[in-house]
């Protein structure tokens, strides 16, 4: 009997370890974000969309796909943006799209970022650590090692462990259906900040920040360098896309963040086209209060201007495909 119990205990322990490994290696493709899940669920049923935009609120609240489609022949695009969705979340969304035959994009426009750091605020967040599957955690460790940020490596593996032991990963079907709103269905995923709970920043405060962002952009003469791990990751994603006859395009949307020039150095390091709309001299409209909502985003009027500015740059790439 004792021998049987010992064998049974060993068997249970082995199965438990196997279960943990399987859980750890299994991508959490939705990182508990019902709105994004609703968008993905909608796209699975609508293969007519041939271009997907993937990124953060800079995509979700600023890319008007209807307006873009009206000005590019043969294009039917969809906004897969998700607020506060950064590199790991976006990579996971892209991998999910590539791994599911229900999606039929010919082009994917991915927001170019280098936002991976974990803060005290988001280390406990389900959406943050939900993105830390094994592949993303290894990538993050290599990325932070090149930056010399060893504290972030430790926090990444802490997030990975939290992800492994967090079992309520996936959204309930009711949550997905609840988020089937007009933005998902009628507006091709685009939702301007006017329709959100985010209040518009007061003019005097916003004007001060806008001026500071412009000054910092023009005063930035640093010799920024590419993080080779990030460049390698994007190039690998581009290869995966190419194998499925999908053109990957990287996109730096406006208005400029304080570190905008740091991202622009990737234009010569990637094997895919990079579109940038951050130069204040080329796009002064993005820096007028009448077109802004808050410190980092445009309002609906500004979003339509940005979308139209994107049209010729995007169309030039699509014509070469």
Image (cartoon, rainbow, N blue to C red):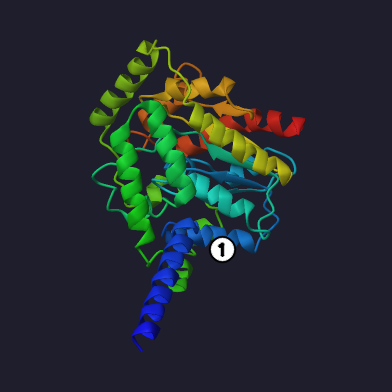
194 over 305 or under it: above or below:
below
Q: Residue at x 70, y 55 (%)?
A: 48
Q: Is residue 97 visible?
A: yes
Q: Residue at x 42, y 39 (%)?
A: 140
Q: Is residue 60 visible?
A: no
**Rendered image quadrant of residue 69:** top right
Residue 136: x and y in percent read 46, 46
Q: Nearer the viewer, residue 259 or 159?
A: 159
In the picture of the structure, the residue carrying the numbered disc 1 is: 41
In the picture, the quarter occupied by the N terminus is: bottom left
Q: Residue at x 49, y 60 (%)?
A: 37
Residue 86: x and y in percent read 43, 42
Q: Nearer the viewer, residue 251 or 23?
A: 23
In the picture, the quarter occupied by the C terminus is: top right
Residue 33: x and y in percent read 42, 58
162 over 71 or under it: above or below:
below
User: Could you tell me which secondary element the residue under label 1 belongs to?
Assistant: helix
């Amino acid at each position: 009997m004792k021998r049987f119990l010992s064998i049974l205990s060993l068997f249970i322990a082995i199965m438990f370890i196997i279960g943990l490994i399987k859980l750890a290696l299994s991508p959490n493709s939705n990182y508990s974000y019902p709105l994004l899940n609703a968008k993905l669920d909608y796209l699975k049923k609508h293969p007519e969309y041939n271009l997907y935009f993937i990124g953060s609120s800079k995509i979700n609240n600023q890319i008007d796909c209807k307006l873009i489609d009206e000005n590019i022949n043969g294009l039917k695009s969809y906004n897969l943006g998700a607020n506060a969705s950064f590199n790991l979340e976006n990579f996971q969304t892209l991998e999910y799209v590539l791994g599911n035959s229900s999606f039929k994009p010919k082009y994917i426009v991915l927001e170019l970022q280098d936002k991976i750091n974990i803060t005290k605020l988001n280390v406990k967040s389900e959406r943050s650590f939900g993105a830390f599957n094994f592949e993303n955690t290894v990538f993050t460790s290599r990325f932070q090692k090149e930056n010399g940020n060893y504290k972030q490596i430790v926090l990444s593996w802490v997030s990975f462990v939290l992800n492994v032991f967090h079992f309520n990963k996936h959204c309930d079907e009711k949550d997905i259906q609840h988020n089937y709103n007009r933005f998902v269905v009628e507006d091709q995923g685009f939702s301007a900040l006017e329709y959100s709970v985010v209040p518009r920043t007061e003019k005097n405060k916003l004007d001060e920040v806008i001026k500071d962002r412009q000054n910092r952009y023009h005063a930035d003469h640093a010799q920024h360098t590419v993080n080779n791990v990030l460049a390698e990751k994007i190039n690998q994603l581009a290869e995966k896309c190419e194998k499925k006859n999908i053109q990957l395009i990287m996109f730096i949307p406006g208005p400029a963040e304080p570190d905008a020039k740091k991202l622009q150095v990737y234009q010569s390091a990637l094997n895919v086209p990079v579109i940038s709309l951050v130069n204040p001299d080329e796009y002064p409209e993005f820096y007028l209060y009448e077109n802004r909502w808050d410190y980092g985003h445009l309002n609906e009027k500004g979003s339509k201007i940005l979308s139209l500015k994107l049209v010729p740059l995007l169309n030039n790439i699509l014509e070469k495909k």
